[in-house]
Image (cartoon, rainbow, N blue to C red):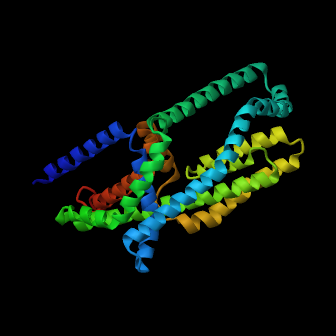
């Protein structure tokens, strides 16, 4: 088979895979979630297997422990979160009015320093951009929910995801061996090298970043609750859980926390304490958690991660969000590999100067 024919075969396979992913995205969420959990827990299964446990027994213990722990946390947190979410949504108009009243003097000073035409232009521009931002965010959320969670019942997630996790975790090494046996023999070494690099990046980002998000969610939730901030638990947990989106998670949490704090407190000291919680969280994340748990050699630029998450959500719904980071890692490794091959080729040439 010629080189062109091999490239054509791979391209056709990639197109078919993308088409099937698009068509079946509404039903793939439990399977993708189970695959992600199995990948996350595979190192634990390997360690238990090294200590003498059979793979089946290790998989059973890990799967049961993981989902029992997850369900226990949900049972404890859901009533608290539900009450806070309902209360927060009900008080949004009051919070907006309170923030407007507190910010009124600042707007009056700004209005006194600017001409009326400038203020009208600034107000209309702010309204226009705010409307566009709300419409865009709503569209993204609608795409994510419409493509995933809204079409899948909670029962399917609770039943299918543990089963997929168990079987994938039990047969993980066998699946790897079978896939490896299907690799083209001439390119097997090169493919293994690139797959190992992809696995290193995904493991560093997904496993490490998931741990960072959980720690930050607990820290922000407890810290804001201790400060006395209303809805501090839900704001803190959401801030931590979306911290895998670079900068976006912290900014959303900081804006929500500041808005609630300004509306709730008449003194600036509690507001400063709320800001202090986010400041400490960022210092701990940037100097300790991320360097230790994720590392600085992951190779995923923050802008690339944000683009991958938004593109995955827009194209394939919530399933696309789950697959976006692994896909970004694969594309990044392949681009770097292609660039390296290009530099070694005659097409790149040699500098004669």
Which residue is nearer to you in this view: 346 or 246? 246
Image quarter hosting the C terminus: bottom left
Which residue is nearer to you in this view: 217 or 253? 217
Q: Does residue 150 appear anywhere in the picture?
A: yes
Position in image of residue 204 (x %, y %): 48, 63
Image quarter hosting the N terminus: bottom left
Q: Residue at x 30, y 41 (%)?
A: 20
Position in image of residue 343 (x %, y %): 30, 60
Position in image of residue 80 (x %, y %): 70, 47
Q: Does residue 80 lie above or below 23 as drawn?
A: below
Number of numbered discs on residues:
0
Which residue is nearer to you in this view: 214 or 349? 214
Location of residue 147 by image quarter: top left
Q: Residue at x 25, y 68 (%)?
A: 189
Q: Does residue 35 appear anywhere in the picture?
A: no
Q: Does residue 45 lie above or below 277 as drawn?
A: below
Q: Does residue 34 lie above or below 42 as drawn?
A: above
Q: Is residue 217 left or right of residue 25?
A: right
Location of residue 47 by image quarter: bottom left
Q: Does residue 114 lie above or below 312 as drawn?
A: above
Q: Residue at x 86, y 42 (%)?
A: 265
The furthest residue to the left: 1
């Amino acid at each position: 088979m010629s080189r062109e024919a091999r490239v054509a075969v791979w391209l056709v396979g990639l197109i078919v895979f993308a088409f099937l992913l698009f068509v079946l995205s509404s039903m793939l969420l439990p399977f993708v979630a189970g695959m992600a959990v199995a990948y996350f827990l595979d190192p634990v299964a390997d360690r238990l297997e090294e200590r003498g446990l059979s793979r089946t027994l290790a998989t059973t213990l890990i799967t049961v422990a993981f989902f029992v722990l997850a369900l226990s946390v949900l049972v404890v947190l859901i009533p608290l979160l539900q009450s806070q979410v309902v209360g927060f949504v009900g008080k949004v108009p009051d919070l907006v009015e309170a923030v407007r009243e507190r910010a009124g003097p600042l707007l009056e000073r700004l209005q006194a320093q600017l001409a009326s035409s400038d203020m009208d232009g600034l107000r209309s521009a702010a309204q226009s951009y705010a409307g566009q931002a709300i419409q865009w965010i709503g569209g993204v959320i609608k795409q994510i929910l419409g493509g995933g969670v809204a079409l899948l019942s909670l029962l399917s997630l609770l039943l299918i995801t543990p089963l997929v996790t168990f079987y994938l975790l039990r047969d993980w090494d066998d699946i790897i061996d079978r896939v490896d046996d299907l690799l083209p023999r001439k390119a097997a070494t090169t493919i293994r090298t690139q797959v190992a690099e992809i696995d290193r990046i995904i493991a560093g980002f997904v496993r490490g970043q998931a741990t960072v998000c959980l720690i930050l969610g607990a820290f922000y939730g407890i810290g804001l609750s201790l400060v006395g901030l209303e809805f501090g638990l839900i704001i803190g947990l959401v801030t931590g859980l979306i911290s895998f989106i670079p900068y976006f998670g912290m900014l959303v949490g900081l804006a929500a926390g500041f808005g609630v704090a300004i509306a709730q407190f008449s003194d600036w000291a509690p507001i400063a304490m709320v800001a202090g919680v986010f400041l400490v969280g960022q210092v701990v994340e940037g100097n300790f958690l991320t360097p230790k748990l994720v590392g600085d050699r992951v190779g995923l630029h923050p802008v690339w991660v944000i683009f991958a998450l938004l593109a995955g959500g827009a194209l394939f719904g919530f399933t696309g969000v789950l697959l976006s980071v692994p896909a970004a890692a694969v594309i990044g490794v392949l681009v770097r590999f292609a660039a390296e091959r290009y530099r070694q080729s005659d097409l790149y040439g040699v500098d004669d100067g």
